[in-house]
Amino acid sequence: MDTIARTPQQIGAGIRRYRRQKKLTQAGLGEKMHARQATVSKLEAGEPATQLRILMDALAALDLELVIRPRTKLTAEAIEDLF
Amino acid sequence: MDTIARTPQQIGAGIRRYRRQKKLTQAGLGEKMHARQATVSKLEAGEPATQLRILMDALAALDLELVIRPRTKLTAEAIEDLF
DNA sequence: CGCGGTTATACGTTTTCGCGTATATTTATG
DNA sequence: CATAAATATACGCGAAAACGTATAACCGCG
C-alpha cells in the first residue's frame, strides 16, 4: 500500500511500516544505509530537521521511491490512514 | 505530471518544475514557506543535507504531497524523465 | 514474571544547516 | 546590447543534526 505524506511524522510512519514489512530492525536498516540506529529512530519519529540524505538513504535501503504530486482531496479512506 | 524521485537532486528538480508551473520565483516561494530565497535555491539544487522541514514546507506552499511506494521498474518513458 | 531483542534517549564532538545580509552570476526582455 | 529580474553564492553566527558510545525504557514471548 502506498503512503501519502504531508508531514515529517507521516514520512516517518511510512518508513517504519515498510521497514517492518521487510522484517528489518532499526539497527539492520541503519547498517544498510550507513547510519546509526538512533538516527533511524529519529527519522521514524518524524524529526523535522532530519536531513534529506537520511530519508533518501532509507528509501533506497528499503527499495522505495518518492512521488511528488498535487495534493489529492482526502477520501474517507485516506482520512483513516491519518490515524 | 507526477514526479518520481530517488535522489535529493530529483526532489529538487520536481519542486522547481512545480514552482515554475505556478509562476512563482524562489523568493516568492520562500516568502510563502518562511524561508530565504537562498534556502529554496539549495533545496532545488538537491543539497542532500537540506532539512525535511524545508522540503515539507515547500510542498505545502505549492499544494503538493509525497507518496512513498515500492520502487517501480523504469519504463523507457520514465528513463527520459531522468534527464 | 523474567529475559532477549528492539527502540528511545544521553553525553560530548564534529559537521552543517538556515539565518541575516550582501553580492556575484545567470537569464529574460525591451 | 543594456538593464532588470531571478538565481547562485559568500561570510559569520547560533542552533541542532549525526556521529561514537552507551544505557535506559519498552515489548513480546516462553
Image (cartoon, coloured by chain):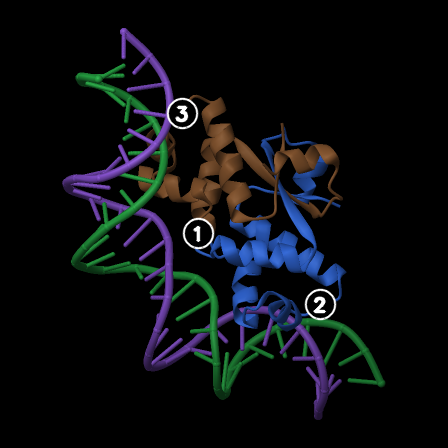
Chain colours: A blue, B brown, C purple, D green
Instruction: State the mark number for residue A24.
Output: 2
Residue drawn 58% across the image and 49% down it:
A10
Quarter of the figure with residue C8: bottom right
Instruction: State the mark number for residue B24.
Output: 3
Secondary structure at badge 1 equals loop
Disc 1 residue type (three-letter)? Gln
Residue drawn 71% across the image and 47% down it:
B71
Q: Is residue B63 left or right of residue B70?
A: left
Which marked residue is nearer to the observer: mark 2 or mark 3?
3
Residue B36 visible in image: no
- Would you say the residues marked 2 and 3 are in contact, meaning their CB atoms lie under 8 Å apart? no
Residue C7, x across and y down, in percent: 61, 69
What is the chain letter for disc 1? B
Residue drawn 60% across the image and 33% down it:
A69
Q: Relative to B39, does residue B80 appear above or below in the rendering?
A: above
Q: Nearer the viewer, residue D7 or B76?
A: B76
Residues packed near mark 3 inside 10 Å, few (<14), some (14 to 19) or many (20 plus): some
Residue drawn 69% across the image and 56% down it:
A17
Q: Relative to D17, does residue A80 appear above or below in the rendering?
A: above
What is the chain letter for disc 3? B
Disc 2 residue type (three-letter)? Leu
Q: Give the mark nearest the N terminus, 1 or 3.
A: 3
Q: Relative to D26, does residue C21 appear above or below in the rendering?
A: above
Q: Is residue C7 left or right of residue B49?
A: right
Q: Is residue B62 left or right of residue A70?
A: left
Residue B14, x across and y down, in percent: 53, 35
Q: CA distance from mark 1 to mark 3?
A: 22 Å
